[in-house]
Amino acid sequence: MIAGLRQRRPVATSPDRTPAATPEAPLVDVRGLRAGYGRVEVLHGVDLSVAAGQVLAVLGPNGAGKSTLLRVLAGLHPAGGGEVVLGGRRVTGADPVDLARRGLCLIPEGRGVFPSLTVRENLRMMTHRRAGMSVADVEERAIARFPRLGQRLHQPAGTMSGGEQQMLALARAIVAEPAVLLLDELSMGLAPRVVAELYATVRAIAEENVTIIVVEQFAATVLAVADTAAVLVEGRIAAAGPPDEIAGRLSGAYLGGQLPPDATTIDEVRS
Ligand SMILES: Nc1ncnc2c1ncn2[C@@H]1O[C@H](COP(=O)(O)OP(=O)(O)OP(=O)(O)O)[C@@H](O)[C@H]1O
């Protein structure tokens, strides 16, 4: 079951924190972003922007550079060129701790939890992320959003189902009230029903004015909750626009919500 929306409570903020969302300007603006590994460039000048409180879905086949894009945005991998602007401030090259302080939070591919720690311990680690937040606050917020976690507080996170682990990863992220949430393939290895449940929650989180960039191969489910979408193919944006338009352009190329594994097929959809 998906918990309903809760009234957000004020927490202490730092002056560096990304300003409250406003609908006028993009909250995240990526311009000509390049990145690679060694001499091999995998992002060849990516332009993307997402308005405050909106969900941007970035779709693309294996190896397109989706995870690399998120890692650069989170400060975990260096940009080789271009820039990242967060809340009107250029943050290219900022370190991950600084970006986290500004309210940017990445849930990486795989489960963003500590498997040997209990659910409670995983949640408690988040108290340091926002001043003025007690352990009780953290647990209360997490359980309000994901009631199932309340029954598993003493269970090691790694023994929960994949869907429950992703709920915990999302719970860890949202208790810190992020300005921007970066999600890398929440759907990996999960049943479609569980994926749909997780993405319904992602939509609800966006409704609380959190800006979300989500990277996925599970096209149909994520497009259903996105405000805008882009297709990344071989490190370049092949298409961008409203989700229904992108879905239409992809419809000939995938069945059952799964993008085709080869970039060539998506290239054919481009024009
Ligand atoms: N640490 C690394 N060292 C060298 N090359 C890497 C590294 N990580 C990723 N790559 C390469 O960069 C390219 C983009 O990888 P990335 O993981 O960003 O793609 P992706 O779109 O997220 O793929 P997937 O959907 O399979 O996770 C791939 O060719 C990959 O092999």
Image (cartoon, grey):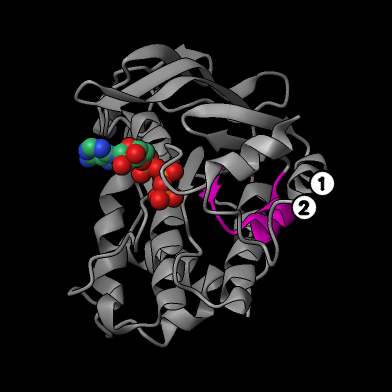
The kind of residue on which mark 2 rests is Ser
x 50%, y 38%: residue = 180
x 51%, y 64%: residue = 187
Residue hosting label 2: 251
Q: Which percent across, then down, holds residue 41? A: 33, 23
For the N terminus, the image quarter is: bottom right
For the C terminus, the image quarter is: top right
Q: In this view, does 75 lie to the left or right of 255?
A: left
Q: In this rendering, is residue 269 above or below 257?
A: above
Q: Callout 1: few (<14), some (14-19), or many (20+) C-alpha neighbours within 10 Å?
A: few
Magenta stretch bounds: 209-226
| Residue 229 seen anywhere in this rendered image of the structure | no
Q: Callout 2: few (<14), some (14-19), or many (20+) C-alpha neighbours within 10 Å?
A: some
Q: Does the magenta stretch include residue 222?
A: yes
Asked if labels 2 and 1 touch by Cβ distance under 8 angstroms, the answer is yes
x 48%, y 60%: residue = 186
The kind of residue on which mark 1 rests is Gly
Residue hosting label 1: 248
Q: Is residue 104 left or right of residue 249?
A: left
Name the quadrant where ligand 1 sits. top left
Q: Which percent across, then down, holds residue 175? A: 43, 56
